[in-house]
Amino acid sequence: MFSKQKDAWKLLEDPAFRRYLFDGGARSGKTDVILVWLIKEAMTRPGARILIARWRLDHARTTLWNLSLKKILPPGIGGVRYHESAMEARFPNGSMIRVGGLDDAERVDKILGDEYLHIFINEATQVSWDTVTKVMTRLSQQIAGAVRKLILDCNPKGPQHWLHQVGVQHVQPSADRRSVQPLPDAAAWARMHWTPYDNPYLPDDTLRTLEALPGIMRRRMLNGEWCNNEGTVYPMFDPDLHCVDEMPPGSEDWPRYRSIDFGFTNPFCCLWGAVDGDGRLWVYRELYRRETQIAELAEIIKATEHGHFRTVADPEDSGARDALANAGIDTMEADKAVSVGIQAVQLRLVKAGDDRPRLFIHSGCINMISEFFEYRWAKNKEGRNGDEKPVKDSDHAMNALRYMVRAVDNPAVYGAAAAPAEFKPGSARDLARYF
């Protein structure tokens, strides 16, 4: 154990802290020391239940279960028995370390069926704040002399990410940077920043590889900086320009829209929007939920706001649309053309002649604003000139936004089998004619 890991161990042992963020560059040794400390806790606290999780189940199995836990503590050492199907390491004293993925409904149900002494979420930037708070409700096992702890580790992303707000700034997650509120348990949080230079055992060639990374990737993976992502789909998005704290006077009389992107394990997203007299779109509310049945979501949507809405939804899930219709919410098929929809959103984000954009987002739409910073272009394979496509991750509110913008911008042909003959998708200049 090297010097930085020894300092981390002391921090984990400190009973004054119950919440931790270990953030920084790759291969710095932060995850290993957390795992060793959790193994020590399982060995020395009979009956303890410890959860180690990542967002994706397959990633948890590969990295945490096979490549980390079983290598640090090989099967049979100390009497530990590994149960592959349940991904549980069971100790002779009755303690257990469970490895899980937070993207699988059945696994999450099983996780929430137990109480835990400690919970460790690896690469926590991949997990939503809502999911973390949900899992934290099971951080409730009582073991004499032990302090229950939530431990998060990650490589940094953009400074607008909820994890930077919670773990670095110790404020409640919010898209409004002008009125942040401290965490109620801020005194219980501890943070340790890491870089590969902290790890004296890191091979020189690995360090040189990290030093040779380009731009933002180098700053994140080597220096451990929280900085905005390059390659984002909407680089023109600026919270200071596009985010508002309240709707303008008279907005209650504007035409109303809703747009829906379906999901269960992945988030379900419904957005509410209104269009002012100058054609500007104001997205003022979001419903962003995982693992919730359509019937329940429909009741939430209906109870949230009454009135007439033009509602568009993902056309590929006809069963979900039928379920909404049965609950009294009629929808039209959304235009899913990705390239055209992205260009339409980009044009609305750009300032118009009056120096104002044509798209505003309420600061309460936290998940949507977070996705603006995470929604990025996929890299084309070498030697190929394929169409630019965004990565299908952190895109649920982005999908719903595209659906709404297309419905607002082109209502005359919306839902038709084909666009007008003179309209040629893929050209920002062509799109501009319809604005």
Image: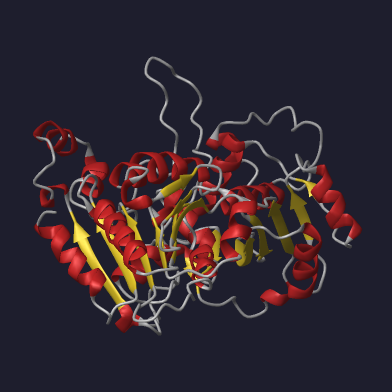
- Tell me residue 310's x, y (percent): 79, 58
- Identify the residue shown where x is 18% and y is 51%: 223
Instruction: Decide if residue 399 is on the left or right side of residue 18.
Output: right
Compared to residue 201, the image places residue 405 above or below, namely: below
- Tell me residue 378's x, y (percent): 44, 34
Give the colouring mode of the picture. Answer: secondary structure
Quick one: which residue is furthest to the top in this view? 383
- Identify the residue shown where x is 59% and y is 77%: 248
Tell me which corner region of the image, top left, top right, bottom left or bottom right, holds residue 379.
top left
189 or 317: nearer the eye?
A: 189
- Quadrant position of the N terminus in the picture: bottom left
- Tell me residue 433's x, y (percent): 62, 40
Could you tell me if residue 288 is visible in this image?
yes
Could you tell me if residue 159 is visible in this image?
no
Instruction: Decide if residue 424 is on the left or right side of residue 182.
Output: right
Tell me which corner region of the image, top left, top right, bottom left or bottom right, holds residue 421.
top right
164 or 307: nearer the eye?
A: 164
Instruction: Decide if residue 237 is on the left or right side of residue 418.
Output: left
Compared to residue 121, the image places residue 20 above or below, namely: below
69 or 339: nearer the eye?
A: 69
Instruction: Decide if residue 55 is on the left or right side of residue 205.
Output: right
Tell me which corner region of the image, top left, top right, bottom left or bottom right, holds residue 36.
bottom left
Compared to residue 16, the image places residue 426 above or below, namely: above
- Tell me residue 402's x, y (percent): 62, 48
Q: How many marks?
A: 0
- Identify the residue shown where x is 65% and y is 43%: 434
